[in-house]
Every structure is written in structure tokens, then in C-alpha cells.
Image (tube, coloured by chain):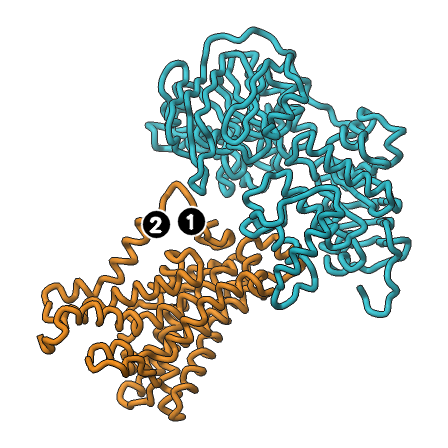
Amino acid sequence: MADGSIGLWTVPLAVLGGAIRVSTPFLFVSLGECITERSGRINLGLEGTLVMGAMSAYGISYLTGSPWLGVLAAGITGALLGALHAGICSLPRVNDVAVGIALMLFGTGLAFYLGKPLIEPTAPRLPAIDFGWWSDIPQVRAALRINVLFLIGVVLAPILYWAFRITRWGLLIRTAGESSDAARAMGHSVLLIRLRATMVGGFLAGIGGSFLSLFYPGSWNEGLSSGQGITAVALVIFARWDPLLCLWASLAFGGAAALGPALQSVGVTSGYHLFNAAPYILTLAIMIITCSPKRTLTGAPAELSITR
Amino acid sequence: MIIGEPPPPSGAFGVDALAMTMRFGDFLALDNVELKVRPGSFHALLGENGAGKSTLVKCIMGYYHATEGDILVGGREQAIANPKDAHALGLGMVYQHFTLVPAMTVAENLVLARDDVPAVVNWPKEMKELEAFLARMPFKVPLAAKVSDISAGERQKCEILKQLYLKRRFLILDEPTSVLTPAEADEVLGMLRDMVVKGELTILMITHKFREVMAFADEVTILRRGKLAGAGKVSELTPDAMARTMIGAEELTVQPPRTGEAGKARLELEKLRALDDAGAMAVHDVSLTVRAGEIVGIAGVSGNGQRQLVEVLAGQREAEGGEIRVAGDPYHASREEMRRHNMSLLPEEPLKNACVGGMSVADNIAFREFDRAPFASGGWWLNRGAFRDDAKKKIRKYKIKTRTPETPISALSGGNVQRAVLARELASDVEVLIAANPCFGLDFAAVAQIHAEIMAARNRGAAVLLVSEDLDELLELSDRLVVMFHGEFVYEARTSEADLTEVGRHMAGH
């Protein structure tokens, strides 16, 4: 044990810090996917969007010297990929799940290809706010160095929760997702609503990607995401399409992902890779517990291809 | 509203559709049809399935653009390019399929339907305005309830209220009472009738129920196969005359008379329970005995557990508890048991529940016996010739209209799909027959044929369980009548002694 002063408290503290740090991409991708799925479409391509976002954010941050321009670039890249997904899906007889898988491979492949020259250089990173200034303990200070993007995400979740209820756009997105017949009978274009919802979803997922390359881990390499985008899509189902639950679920997944490194830091090294698999095991376990062959999921948008 | 045009006159107005012709490729859906709805009248549009009623009103509402013909709104010619134009003119339509969003509240659905939904909805203010609006309306709906939680009758009232909330003054109703009990239907139509009499509203109602035409409509237009078959004042017509105009010269299958007495118990349900897709109890401890040579009818408004009950009997859903016995043996809907007990099934939506749409008519007809002689040798080598020969025989016997036995069954009309299922299910000796809404959406000829076949099966000694939302059908066919409400059997009587008001009361859960 490197620091005897707080002993085993290192583990929960590291898990908390990890939850805040690791959950940010989960949070952005799941909020984005929440919007898309509420409009009646599932976008599995967000894994590709996440990686493309990470790559473009890193590239732009490196070229311009401004990490915030990088974040913006990541969002725009994500929105474009979302538009591509929505565009293909608006063709007749196209399955959104299949398109999503294709775009996932396309996005990651393209990011690896374009990102080759970015592995070596170092780009300016996003700033963090030090909420641990009151403490002398380095672990506490480390855990409470909180990134601005995380704070934005935390504010965004309740805003979305309300937006689905009291704004015109929120109601329209829900209508398109619950009954496209009803939306059409009111004279709205379901495809247009879904295009916009998928673009916003892609925008948020891209920002989630920028966090990966510009804050934590904070560099660009090909193993950056390791399936976080796809895990976040599953997380939306677990969160029952509720933005507030998405926030809590993201924190839980972030905490699970931080478990392995946290245990390693106090000297528990056996089963390290097993603990690293915690988020995936959590995904599986949650899916098994919450799904039943006999009933449909409560809260699921009725137009979603997986519930229809 | 087209900018620059003066607004249409206030109060009820009429709509005339003149010389309407609508072509879909080679198919002539409307052929020079005329429809004149006078302002402030209750007009019924009658016709069989496929007669062109829906096409005609969809042309008026701007969903379709007629190949030829003109539409006059309030006496002035209007080019209605899309539903929004129709709405701007004050035209509204209540669809047969609900267009409310089930996961949202009634209030959300009403506000959402407006053209000018504010970017941020001020709910307290909107609720106050909605309550003020409801206070002026003849019927009430719970504003804060989710649409998925209210009854079918309330949903239909909501649909109509939505149109009134949007200040529509010409209302098209497409089979508005198909999900209502007779009492609810009378209530809703009666209130609309009052608004028509006051001159606030003009109504065009698509229907096939003569009772409602006689009771509520002033005038009627009858279509047959895309052509105008007749029109006139309801007071000068009889149901018989209207029916004859609707069907034309086509001969209907004559239903055999009811013969023979009920025998031994064949199908027994004991404390059967089943869940719906959301995991809620849909069928709650129902017990019932159907005897040989007897038709037991299950009445009820749709959504009271009938679908789940039939799915359990068909093997499409697992029962949560209870027992099914056929001829005394426990029954789990396996193929072997179905064959041993000669179980037959006519499920609702036959194309979805009893057919494989992409496979041929011949294959679909052979499903029950396809791996036995003469269709197969040794249980695996299929003899295509036998499929075709058998199908040809049954296509002739059951008057299935298909181009060839090899045509995919999904290409057939609803009536002919049901005839093909009938041919498959009733060809051999039937001991137990379960039928669910077997005539839903079918034309007179198909209905007459299906009713005749069901009665014939009963006379041959089959135990028949007939689940239907059509009370007239049940009164005509069944020996015994059971009412299902909220997953339970709440009323039972011999059909000959059943009291209609009593039945209606139990259907509505009072």
C-alpha cells in the first residue's frame, strides 16, 4: 500500500472518482441515444460515432490548440454520422439495427484510418475544476478533479427530462416514437423528426467521444473506446428511456469500470482482468434480470424495431 | 388556409364530391362517384369492404389525389393538396384505427394535435383551458389519465373531442362504433346528432351497421365496387333495400338451420389465467364448458382478455395457471394433441395468426397435414403434386378467389385469406372449433359463408367457442352467451333467453 493514511478507503474513493470520470462518455452517449430511441429509432452506430468524435476532437484540438473547438468538431462529426444513419433508414425496407452495425464498423474504421497520424502528437486537453481544494489527501483531490463536460451532462439530464414533457419538440419526438400513425395523422413528417433526433443523438455521442481523447484517458489510440458506445446503448434500455435514470445508470457503469484499477491501486492484483470486465458483466446481468420473454419492456417506445 | 382567401362561413357546411374517379395503376377504385353531403346533416356512407368508401373520404381529406373529379367545400371548389389544407378548411376525420398516442395523457394528446403547439407548453394554463373546453362538451374524458389506461369507448370519445377541440365543423367518422358497446355507441352518436341538429356540425359516417344508419342518419350514399349504387333519404329506405343495393346480384350462402342437441362436454377450461404483454393479469380464473354440438359465444368489448384467452387455446401464449381439458384429457396445444382431438382454430387477423404470408395458398392450406401421406412420403419427402391437387379441390369447394394455387397467400383479399384458413381447418372432422372475430372486416358473401360453415360444424357435432366483438354475430350463431369483462366471465345465459340490455350492461362493466 503506497499511502497508509487512508488505507482501504482508497477503493470507494477511487470508485467514486472513477464513476465521475469514466461515466461521462456513457452519459453523453446514453442521453443522445435516449433522444434517438424516443423518436422510434435505434442507432447502434454510436460506437462508431464515439470513436470518430474522439479522433476528430483530438485532431482539431491539436491543429487549433483549442480543446473546445475539438469538442465542437466532435459534435458536428457525430451529427453528420447521425444524419447518415437517419438518411439511410428513411429509405424503404431498411432495418435500423443493420444500418447501425454497418455504421459502427464504418465509424471505427474511418477513425482508425484518419487518426493514424494523431497517435504520436499531444493535443491540448480539456480543463477540470478542482472541487477537492479543501482536502490535503491527494486521493480525495484526484477524485474530485471534475471535468466540465461531466457537469454539462449532469445538467443536461434533467433538462431533457423536462423537455420531453413540456416542449413542443419533446412531445413531437415522443409522438413519433410511440405512434407514427398518430404523428402522420397530425400532418408531421416522422422521417424528419427522426432525422433531427438522430442528429442530436449523434451530436451528443460525438461530444462523449471528445471526452475520451481530450480528458480521460486523454490521448488518441485505437483501443480508446473498447465498446463503451455499445454499452451505453444497452444502458438506455436499462434506464427505461428516462434521461434521469440514464444519469444514475451511467454513474453505476462508470463506477463498475473503475473497480479494476481501484483494486489494483490497493494491491489486489489477482483477477484484475476479471474486475475490468465488471461493466460488461453488469450489462449482461441487468439484461437478464430486467427482460422477460413473457412481457414487453415497460416504457419502451412502441415504434422501436426491437419492441414491435 | 390559403392566404388571401376569405375564411369559410361559420357553423356547419356541406361537402360535395363530384364525378370522382380514382385509379391505382390498373385498378379502378372509384368510378365516377358522386357524394353530396348537405350542410348540417348526418350522412351515412355505406358499402362493403373494398367498395371505395375509404378511398373516397381520403380523397376529400387530401391523402389521395383523385385522378378526376372536383371537391366543393361549402359550395366552393377547393384544391385540397394534403390533410393540412383539409384541416384549414375545417374538415376533420376520426380514423378507424386510433390516432391517439397510448403512452401519453389525454391532455398531452389534445394539445399536441393543435397546429400551434407552443415551443414550451405552459401546462397549468393549458389544463385550465382544456377544462373550460370540456365543460362545454357533451361528454367527459379524464384529462390526466394515460390513453393506454382508459377504455376503448373513452378513447373513441377522445378522438371525437380532439376534432371538436380543433374546431372542425365537418367531421368524417370511419366506423366509429366498432369498439363501442351498443349503449356507448348510442350515447356518442346521439350527442353528435344533437350538435348536427343545432347546426354546429356536419357529419359523414362510414359504417356497415344499418341500425345506426336508421337511428341517426338523415341521408345515405351507398357504394358498390367503386361505383355509386344508390343514395337517398334514410326515412324512405329500409335496411333490406340498403343491403340489396350494397351487395348487388351476388348470391349469399344459405346458413343451414340449427339441428341436434348438445352432447357431452368437449372443451373444458378450469380457473385458466394468463398475462398480457405488459405482464398484467389479462385472463383471470375463467372456467367454462363447451359441449359437443354447441356454440358458446364470448361477448365483450375488445381488450378485455379475449385475445389472450384465444392465444392460450391456440398455443401462442403460456397459461399462468389453471387447466384446459379436451374430451377429458389435459390439453397443452401441442401439434399431436391438436391432431388427436381434431382441434380447429380460426384466429383473428388470419393472415398474421394462421398463415405464412409469403408462402403459397396451396402450402398454407396443407399446413395441418403436410408431413403425412398423401402430402409426404416417409414423413419428409414432400409430394408437390398432392399439395396442388388438394388445394385445387378446396379452392373450388370453398370458393377461394386466387389466380393460382401457387400465388402467395398475402396477395389475397381478407375474405379469401379467411376462406383458405376455413378450408384448411374445417376440411376434416372437427371436434373442437375455436373462432375469434372470424368475420372482422369481411364482405357479406364471406360472412354468410363463414357463418354457414360454423353452423354446419356445430350441427355435425363440433364444440364451438366463438369469441367475437360483434354482438349481432353472437346472437345469430351461439347457443349460449358469455360476457367477458376485465378478464373474467361476468354473465352467462342461453342466447334465446339473453336480455340485450343486461348483456350490454355487463359488457360495459356495470
Asked if the residue at tag 1 contacts the one at tag 2, i.e. Cβ–Cβ closer than 8 Å, the answer is yes
Viewed as shown, does residue A243 lie left or right of A229?
Answer: right
Q: Quadrant of residue B497?
A: top right
Q: Residue at x 38, y 83 (%)?
A: A57
> In the rendering, at what x and y percent does residue B294 appear?
54, 13
> In the rendering, at what x and y percent does residue B44 appear?
80, 38
Distance from Cα at disc 2 to Cα at disc 1: 8 Å
The residue under label 1 is A297
Looking at numbered disc 1 in the image, what kind of residue is underneath it? Answer: Leu
User: How would you rate the neighbour count of disc 1 (Cα within 10 Å): few for under 14, some for 14-19, many for 20 or more?
Assistant: some
Chain A color in figure:
orange
The residue under label 2 is A290
Vertical comparison of B498 with A183: above or below: above
Q: Nearer the viewer, residue B50 or B348?
A: B348
Q: From where the camera sits, is residue A221 visible?
A: no
Chain B color in figure:
cyan
Q: Residue at x 47, y 79 (%)?
A: A76
